[in-house]
Amino acid sequence: MDNKTEYKKSNLIMVRYGEISLKGKNRPVFEKKLAGNIRYALRDLGRPRIKMLQGRMIMNAGNMDIQQVIDRLSRVFGIVSISPVHKVAAAVEAIYEEALNSIKQVLENKSSGDSLSFRVTVKRADKSFPVNSMDLSRDLGAYLLEHIPELSVDLHNPDTVVSVDIREGCAYIFSDTRHGPRGLPVGSSGRAVLMLSGGIDSPVAGWMSMKRGIELEAVHYHSFPFTGEKSKEKVLDLCRAMVCYGGKINLSVVHFTEIQKDIQKKCPEEFRVTIMRRFMFRIAQRIAEKKKALALVTGESVGQVASQTLESMNAIGSVTAMPVLRPLVGFDKEQITRLARQIGTYDISIQPYEDCCTLFLPRYPSTKPRVEKVQDAEKNLDVEDLVAGALEKTEEHSFSIS
Ligand code: ATP
Ligand code: MG
């Protein structure tokens, strides 16, 4: 190989997915969903060609910017890892030559003079290939060492792994692998309604649900004019941040002021938070029915605040027969905050705009409300009328990956 030949960048990307392959008969459905989500995530960059290859996808990114493609893919749920790959004929010389190119490329991206430790892994899906995996990795390792003096072998903790994946008639070679977010393709588990406040927790709860393949319909309760435009904008920004992981999210902004005022006027102070939350759940259920969603999602965890005791959850949850998912139930605030930072919602959530719930907070909310007592405290409200009124004033927004 002539050293001066410019190394041609590949436009092929290998995408590995994990859990989908466990799904037995549903597997083709999941694969189709993942391929669809990938296409959707890249739709403003170009139209990739995607080929299924026994539990992997090989994607031809054409003339799209590979780094940009990899960045987008690293947020598509269902993907375990991503590697730019080169495809060569399944012949020992071709594999050697490409592996050498590939590791030279890694070295080029390091500061000059640095050494690089490496290991070779070979997978031989095509057993008719004449050399077995063990022999090929050993011999290829020796060949690379011989040709590049800066290299050293480290089997346990190498800087880079040169991988060779031999299939029928061809081999894929790569030495750069990025993690995907794992999980299941969004949409493969159906749809749920996320109750999205402007706080730190609910966007993380939404992200965790998307990770399990759930497509989100978000609902936000807004108390205009007590909460201003800025607090609504903040929730729109949260949706924009979350949608990078989820293809599309619809948001219903529900005007909650009338309900809150009526509760304040007609209900005993200690039950106001519980009653307000019961309305949130009732309205979320109605939106779920309309949007064909099968569950509600909240950012609650146990014991964080007065309304998050098991007694409160009972009194609130009894207004709906729908399953209520609380993905953060066992997390503490520090773990939630760390995740919020990682997924990019934290900086938006900490902007100091009022949430509707903080406005009408009583001094001493009941931490152990009994369902019968709450029902009694609600008796002067026209529940159906209030719910219908709020639904009528709902404002809808749609978000999709740019
Ligand atoms: P968050 O950080 O998500 O606001 P929190 O710890 O502040 O959660 P609460 O304010 O008690 O807890 O709210 C519990 C959950 O109720 C939220 O995670 C969210 O799912 C829902 N919720 C609260 N306020 C609203 C709102 N204004 N609109 C929609 N959902 C809400
Ligand atoms: Mg909150």
Image: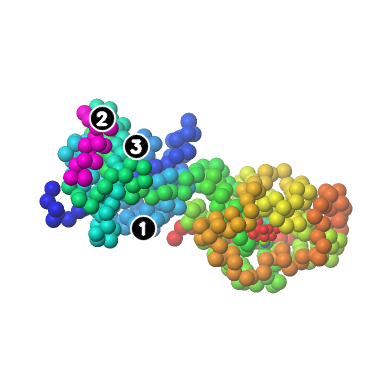
Rendering quarter of residue 277: bottom right
Does label 3 point to a residue whose CB lies under 8 Å from ligand 1?
A: no
Which one is in front in this view, the residue at disc 3 or the one at disc 2? 2
**Which quarter of the rendering shows the C terminus?**
bottom left
Residue 53's disc number: 3
Q: Residue furthest left?
A: 2
Task: Tell me the kind of residue under disc 3.
Answer: Leu
Q: Residue at x 62, y 63 (%)?
A: 198
Q: Position of residue 3 (x, y in %)?
A: 14, 53
Total labels drawn:
3
Task: Tell me the kind of residue under disc 2.
Answer: Asn
Which one is in front in this view, the residue at disc 2 or the one at disc 1? 2
Principal secondary structure, stretch drawn in magenta: helix
Q: Which residues are magenta?
A: 130-146
Q: Is residue 333 above or below residue 227?
A: above
**Which residue in the structure is indicated by mark 2?**
132
In this rendering, position of residue 122 left or right of residue 340 = left
Give the secondary structure at mark 1: helix
Task: Tell me the kind of residue under disc 1.
Answer: Gln
**Does residue 47 show up magenta in the picture?**
no
Residue 360's disc number: none
Residue 68's disc number: 1
